[in-house]
């Protein structure tokens, strides 16, 4: 049994979008456990177990894990997935990597080191005995040598304390209009496992944006030029239905909206991003 756990917050459209991809790629027996806030009950189906949102995002995920642990057997698995994340390959591929924890690691976010809950697969027994948590607090030094923490920080600490290895899955599409949002994650040389839209239910800001704003002007111009070259390649403007402005990048919110419209058009939408 695979327990699928996600937190949906205020953006009902992601419920249906994610369901489409879960329906296609959940190729093992499973249950779906969600916490939700600000979303009508009729956005969910009878096959989705929905609980009231409680606490922070990390606490809500920990609440779902605690519910699953009450029923999970020795050979069961957990899948934590963000509401704006979509599997793009059979979940059995992640389970088949044969390590107790497989997780996105967002090194592109100025050197984040911790497992990220946008997509994490674990055995139930491993999560029980570690014990697993999505809380923040434990700090590490990023590429700017600043000490930072984020969701999953305490999980990283427990993995390190027990000298427990895990399998990171990392960003495969390094080109794009943004270095963090709209990411495809997997193992190099293999097809992606998951697409993560990013900031699907919150304000679109990140540490990597703040770092870029502090860079000298010529570095900022170089980064913008690289992103513009990617966007112009293969008529990507036209594919997204954005007005073509050859000297400007689209606003990230406009790009997000255009890409979200494209997601339901085909189950291979993500190939366009590589």
Image: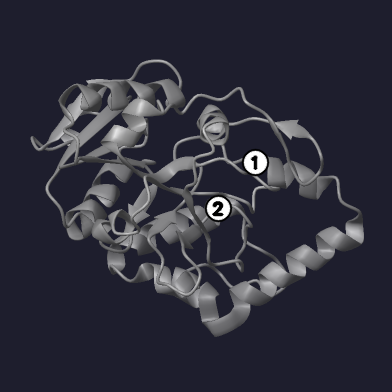
Residue 212 at x, y percent in the picture: 78, 50
Q: Secondary structure beneath disc 1?
A: loop
Left or right placement of residue 112 versus residue 243 in this view: right
Q: Is residue 181 left or right of residue 85?
A: right
As rendered, which of 68 and 41 lies closer to the eye?
A: 68
Residue 233 is drawn in which quadrant?
bottom right
Please state if 216 lies on the left or on the right of 184 as rendered.
Answer: right
Tell me what residue is drawn at x 50 percent, y 24 percent.
135
Q: Residue furthest left?
A: 46
> Which is more toward the observer, 57 or 77?
77
| Residue 141 visible in the snapshot | yes
- The image shows residue 70, relative to residue 268, as above or below, that is above
Figure quadrant of residue 80: top left
Q: Quadrant of the N terminus?
A: top left
| Mark 2 touches mark 1? (CB < 8 Å) | yes
Q: Residue furthest top?
A: 55
Q: Residue 218: x and y, percent?
A: 90, 62
Residue where numbered disc 1 is placed = 206
Q: Give the vertical position of 64 relative to 194 (above or below).
A: above
- Earlier sequence position, callout 2 versus callout 1: 2
Q: How many marks?
A: 2
- The secondary element bearing badge 2 is classed as loop
259 to 74, vertically: above or below = below
Left or right relative to 40: residue 154: right
Label 2 and label 1: CA atoms lie apart by: 9 Å
Q: Percent position (x, y) of residue 230?
A: 63, 74
Question: Mark 2 highlights which residue?
Answer: 181
**Is disc 2 surrounded by few (<14), some (14 to 19) or many (20+) residues within 10 Å?**
many
């Amino acid at each position: 049994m695979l327990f699928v756990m996600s937190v949906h917050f205020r953006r009902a459209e992601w419920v249906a979008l994610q369901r489409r991809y879960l329906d296609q790629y959940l190729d093992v027996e499973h249950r779906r456990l969600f916490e939700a806030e600000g979303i009508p009950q009729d956005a969910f189906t009878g096959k989705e177990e929905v609980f009231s949102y409680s606490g922070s995002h990390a606490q809500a995920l920990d609440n779902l894990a605690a519910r699953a642990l009450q029923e999970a057997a020795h050979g069961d698995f957990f899948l934590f997935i963000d509401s704006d994340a979509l599997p793009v390959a059979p979940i059995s591929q992640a389970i088949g990597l044969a390590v107790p924890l497989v997780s996105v690691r967002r090194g592109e976010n100025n050197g984040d080191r911790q497992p990220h809950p946008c997509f994490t697969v674990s055995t139930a027994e491993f999560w029980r005995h570690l014990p697993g948590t999505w809380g923040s607090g434990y700090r590490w030094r990023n590429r700017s040598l600043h000490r930072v923490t984020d969701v999953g920080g305490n999980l990283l600490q427990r993995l390190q304390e027990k000298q427990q290895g895990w399998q990171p899955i990392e960003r495969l599409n390094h080109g794009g209009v943004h270095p963090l949002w709209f990411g495809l994650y997997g193992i190099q040389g293999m097809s992606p496992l998951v697409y993560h839209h990013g900031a699907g239910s919150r304000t679109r800001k990140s540490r990597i944006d703040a770092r870029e704003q502090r860079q000298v002007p010529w570095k900022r111009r170089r980064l913008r030029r690289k992103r513009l070259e990617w966007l112009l390649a293969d008529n990507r403007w036209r594919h997204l239905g954005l007005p073509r402005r050859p000297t400007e990048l689209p606003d990230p919110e406009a790009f997000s909206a255009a890409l979200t419209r494209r997601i339901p058009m085909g189950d291979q939408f993500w190939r366009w991003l590589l």
